[in-house]
Image (spheres, rainbow, N blue to C red):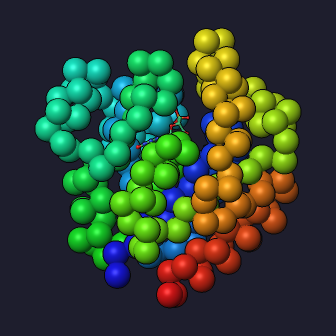
Amino acid sequence: MNKLLIFTAPSGAGKTTIVRHLLTRFEELAFSVSATTRARRPNEIEGKDYYFLSLAQFKTLVRDGAFLEWEEVYENKFYGTLRSEVERLWNLGKCVVFDIDVKGAESIKNIYPDQALAIFVKPPSFEVLVKRLEMRRTENEDSFASRVHRAKEELLFQDNFDAVLLNDDLQRTLQEAEKMVSRFIQI
Ligand code: ADP
Ligand code: 5GP
């Protein structure tokens, strides 16, 4: 069966950290590289972290029905999962791993209810989440403020998913995440 493993959470909760770790531990997994119109961060690689697109390119793909789901996560910052990306990874026999916002996660879970496991990554508190975002130092003032604002809303969505993974102590969290993945890929 073609499987999907979805990690969702507000920005700064720790999805990317957890997903990167899992990808080193399980060769059965492969990361779904999303398309986005946001600027590339210095440490990010085109085609590995994201497909970085102009707004015009993104809109053309929307019009052509190329996306399984897409969202305007922040004002004028679009993110989407390409159908071709999921097909490509399934054709390699992989379980596809997503790092996406809560609305995108709900969309994918609704499209594939029996094949997908959707995990909400929960920070210990709103204050800790804000601290982690600050420490990451990737955002300018505007984008930091919009992430914090959106995080408040996104934290309310945790009950809509199959499981909640509390990200407090990182080592404990990674172990718990590994157990979840082991169970899911064996089914
Ligand atoms: P997301 O992908 O959800 O936006 P990241 O994985 O980028 O979140 O994590 C946000 C920041 O918090 C990063 O700097 C990361 O190193 C740090 N971080 C993640 N998990 C923990 C944790 N359990 N304890 C402390 N810092 C963490
Ligand atoms: P960032 O800019 O920090 O990489 O991501 C911002 C938010 O967009 C995060 O919540 C991230 O999970 C989400 N995101 C990344 N890719 C996608 C995608 O393809 N679709 C949706 N809906 N959200 C995405």
Residue 22, visible in the rendered structure: yes
* 52 to 87, vertically: above or below: above
* Residue 71 in the figure: left or right of residue 126: left
Query: Residue 46 location, x and y as percent?
Result: 35, 38
Query: Residue 32 location, x and y as percent?
Result: 39, 54
| Residue positioned most to the top | 141
In the rendered view of the protein, which quadrant contains the N terminus? bottom left
| Residue positioned most to the bottom | 187
Which sits in the foreground, 44 or 81? 81
Query: Residue 61 location, x and y as percent?
Result: 20, 35
* 181 to 13, vertically: above or below: below
* Residue 113 in the figure: left or right of residue 162: left
Quarter where residue 54 is shown: top left
Which sits in the foreground, 87 or 169? 87
Tell me what residue is drawn at x 43 percent, y 24 percent.
77
Tell me what residue is drawn at x 42 percent, y 51 percent.
107
* Residue 57 in the figure: left or right of residue 131: left
* 60 to 114, vertically: above or below: above
Query: Residue 168 location, x and y as percent?
Result: 83, 53
Quarter where residue 172 is shown: bottom right
* 94 to 125, vertically: above or below: below
Tell me what residue is drawn at x 50 percent, y 81 percent.
185
